[in-house]
Each structure stands twice: as structure tokens, then as C-alpha cells.
Amino acid sequence: MAPTYDVIVLGLGGMGSAAAHHLAARGARVLGLEKFGPVHNRGSSHGGSRITRQSYFEDPAYVPLLLRSYELYEKLERDSGREIATLCGGVMLGRPDSRTVRGSLESARQWDLPHEMLEPKEIRRRFPTLTPAEDEVALYEARAGLVRPEYTVAAHVQLAGQDGAELHFEEPVTRWEELPGAAGVRVHTPENTYTAGQLVICPGAWAPQLLTDLGVPFTIERQVMYWFAPRGGTAPFVPDRHPIYIWEDDRGVQIYGFPSIDGPDGGAKVAFFRKGTVCTPETIERTVHDHEVRAMADQLAPRLPALPGRFLKAATCMYSNTPDEHFVITRHPGHPETVTVACGFSGHGFKFVPVVGEIVADLALTGTTAHPIELFDPRRPAAAAA
């Protein structure tokens, strides 16, 4: 007889591990199924650091979810005993009319978030590592910082297991189907067949393959993260001296970066935001080429002159983009009684991991949530635009 559960969670990366934790914490019988091992580096939940911030240039509608996510990250640290977040402050830099600055200021004002607007001279005084142009400004947010993606996933996996979730790694799902009369779901793997009342799908970069009937044309992009050893050492780049940053140039190109968090030999991490190449999880080029390193260093040189001192390493990950770059979090329109999906996080989702887990648990167990998720409906016209 097939093992039966209350909820099966497909995918145990950032979002899936959080969903498994929140479901198990509420007493649900949970089975988690993951194609790779625990805390793997094949998707989008690795790389040592992710930015977290509240003055959100993407849309003010995200701010309530961010405030809740901050609370849940603090709880995750307490419950797991792990240090996950570092709130070192952050600057959103660019011309005053850039999306990065203008959108961040809009969110800060709408939600009355503490912030400061800094002119170039003040930016250079506070953060000597940064050299903005005379026509650039910054929004400074003291509550911005970074979270550790691998620690986040490990903490959620740890707590889900402590609460009784059964987590199977290296057991890929081959197919699933809804039972007649929406009585539940049946999930097939090479090892077994399982049934459950509910299915949660957190597919990451595998969304185009697993959710072809959702009606959203997901695009998977290869992204590259770089680590450089600053000239003169990492001391000026440690978290109590150097903030996280998102910096938009006059062409609309954004870079982002972090303080040095891995010791004197770990360098500092930087990357382009949305300058990727289309790929699939099977075809992604994992090798990072010299011309890519040069392009990153060239973008850094006039802005953080000490940083592109010596290239240390690079790693790839994947963005799972929707056409409008907003998330998809919903009961599946084609299976509204049994299936919940969370995907399409478009390169800016990891800071939301704990609250997405909470929302997904709400949807799977009650069919609704008190959190504002109207923006994430896959039936919105912008989500279907190819």
C-alpha cells in the first residue's frame, strides 16, 4: 500500500524546506522529496549570501511580507541555534530618478520605514570603499543586510525533521496526478509511489518542466556570482564598515555586493543583477569565463576601486523569471482543491523564504492566507505576457 501523508512537498530548496518546516510545525504529516542532496548547489539557494532589505524598489506591495519575513528569520535563528542574518546596513545607489533609488524611496515613504538620503560626499565619508559620481545619491537603510542561504535551508530542514517531517533526498519526482474527485494526489518517484491530501510544488528552476499547465512562460537564466580579494585587504570591507549595496548606472545596469564575511582570505562577493543568459537546469554552463570576470571588474573599478584587486572564484546559480518579475504563489488554478505552487521568484525571492513557507502552509492546510498575495496570482495579465 502506498504511504499516505497530509502534504507532500516537492522540492526542498529555500522555499520547499521552509514550507516543510511550517507544515510540520502545525502537526501535518509531511513528506519532502528532493532531486538532489540536502543544501545543494544546483539551483538557486547557495552562494554564501543573499541581500535582505525592506525599502523595496520592486514594488511597495512586498513590504508587509518583508516585515514578517524579518520576524520569522529571527525566530528561525532562535529555534535552530544558527546565526543566519547580518544586518550591516545597506545603500541603494544611482541617479535620483533611477529605479533603484526612486523605487526604494517610494517604498520607504509609503510604509514609513526608517531611512536616510545621502549625497555623494556623505556616502564617501561614511563608506570610504564607495566612490559615487557627483550626480548619484543613495538611500541608506540601517535594517538592510544579508542572510546565509545554506544556513537558512539547513535550519528549515533541521526543524522540519525535528517536528516529524519525513525528508527524502536524491529521490526525484517523475510524475504526479490528482486523484479522482480531487480526493488527493498521487506522486511517483523511482523508489515508490506516495499519496497525500495536498501537494506543494516548489520547483525553482524546474518550474517550466513541472508546471507547464500553469500558463506562465517562465524563463530560466544563468547568473554568476564573483568573489574578489580587495587591494589592501578585507579590513575596510567587514560588515561593521561596509554595507550591502545595489548600484544602478546611467544605462540601468545594476550590480550588487556584500561585505567580507568569510575571513581575510574570503574576499567580497559581487554580481550583476539581471544580466544573465537563458538556460535550463540541464544546459547551464557552470564554467565562468575570463571575459565575464573582466566585465564584472570593469563595472566595479570606478565604483569600488579597491575591490577588483584579485579574482578569487566564481559560481553560477539560476534565476526563475516571470515576465513581470513578480512571484507566483497560489493554489494551482487547474487543481485548486489539492495543489499549491510557489515559484518564479525572479532573482529576488530568498529574503522572503520564511514568510513564503508560512504562506504555503496556510494555503495547503486551509486554502487561504491572511498575507497579501494578490500580486502573485498567475492569472494576472502581466504574468502571461511572453
Image (spheres, grey):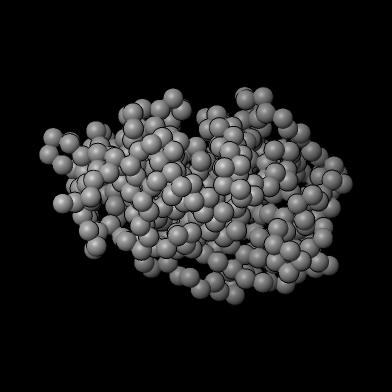
* Residue 91, above or below 230: above
Nearer-the-camera pick, 356 or 170 = 170
Residue sitting at 49 percent across and 51 percent down? 158
Residue sitting at 62 percent across and 25 percent down? 111
Q: 19 left or right of 229? A: left
Residue sitting at 34 percent across and 45 percent down? 30
Counting from the top left corner in percent of width and height, residue 108 is at 65, 30
Question: Is residue 386 visible to us here?
Answer: no
Counting from the top left corner in percent of width and height, residue 188 is at 22, 55
* Residue 210, above or below 21: below
Q: How many marks?
A: 0
Question: Is residue 39 visible to us here?
Answer: yes
In the current view of this chain or complex, which residue is farthest to the left?
A: 180
Residue sitting at 40 percent across and 41 percent down? 24
Counting from the top left corner in percent of width and height, residue 73 is at 58, 41
Nearer-the-camera pick, 171 or 301 = 171
Counting from the top left corner in percent of width and height, residue 259 is at 72, 55
